[in-house]
Amino acid sequence: MALRAAGRQSLVDTVVEQLRAQLAEGEWKVGDRVPTEHALAEQLQVGRNTVREAVRVLVHAGMLQSRQGEGTFVVSTTDPAEVMRDVRRAGIRDVLELRIALEAEGARLAALRHTPADLRRMRAALKLLESLEALESPEPFEHAGEQPASGSHELYASHDVGFHIAVVDAAHNAALSATYGWFSTSVRESLVASLGDRELPSISHADHRALVDAIASGDPAAAEAAARALLETPKRAIEALLAADATG
């Protein structure tokens, strides 16, 4: 693939992507010395400072290595950050699949066994989520298409996990509550990771409210379906991204 002139927008990012593509396509192999800054700048029609910054990004990513007095050499044709992103997403998918199994059964039993106190606990947990949202955005996430601000990911994840623990506890099954309590650390970690991934769908509080309403209705089938629906959207998104990465 021939290098093409970079556009005027986000020049460093453009150059990084083109150099990364060259490496992935085998233009330069591991151990090869890449062209000089001057040569790359001429090919891309950008300044040498732009090329220098792009090379620094790829050095930091572990794809290139700069050797004083010798030049810049290829150490990897695969971006480790991209690999780690795929691994993280696969981990999120695994957690979501187990969450569906546990939370769907928890919601089904909760519809049959919940108490008024259980419903108050769920609604209080949901109110905490919505209160945090109000601090971050003037519009609901499901309308604004936004995730919580990066600084609040961990706090938001903790509140969300608290909501789902309340749902599972409403099943009044000690073994299920203990299992989910142990598993909740993985749930929280995967949620923090997903909140930081802009390619994943935004969180819908409407789905959370629908789950509470289904449990309150006392209909076990509706509650199970609501629990599954809440998690199926992110699971399908994760599967689509993993499939695209595998074929790309």
Image: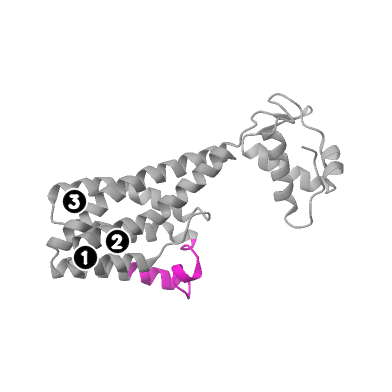
The residue that appears at 50% across and 70% down in the rendered structure is 144
In the rendered structure, which amino acid carries the disc numbered 1? Ile
Q: Quadrant of residue 127?
A: bottom left
**Residue 82: x %, y % from top left:** 56, 40
Marks 1 & 2, CB-CB < 8 Å contact: yes
Vertical relation: 49 (above or below) 10: above
Earlier sequence position, callout 2 versus callout 3: 3
Is residue 95 inside the magenta stretch? Answer: no
**Residue 153: x %, y % from top left:** 43, 58
Q: Distance between the residues labelled 3 and 1?
A: 17 Å
Q: Which of 164 and 100 is in front in this view?
A: 100
Q: Which of 57 and 205 is in front in this view?
A: 205
The residue that appears at 72% across and 55% down in the rendered structure is 10
Q: How far apart are marks 1 and 2 (CA)?
A: 9 Å
Q: Mark 1 points at which residue?
A: 215
Q: Name the residue under label 3.
A: 177
Earlier sequence position, callout 1 versus callout 2: 1
Q: Name the residue under label 2.
A: 226
Tell me where the magenta segment starts and ends, as one range: 128-149
Q: Nearer the viewer, residue 166 or 54?
A: 166
Q: In which quarter of the image is residue 2?
A: top right
Vertical relation: 228 (above or below) 64: below
Vertical relation: 216 (above or below) 5: below
- Residue 144 appears anywhere in the view: yes
| Quadrant location, the C terminus | top right
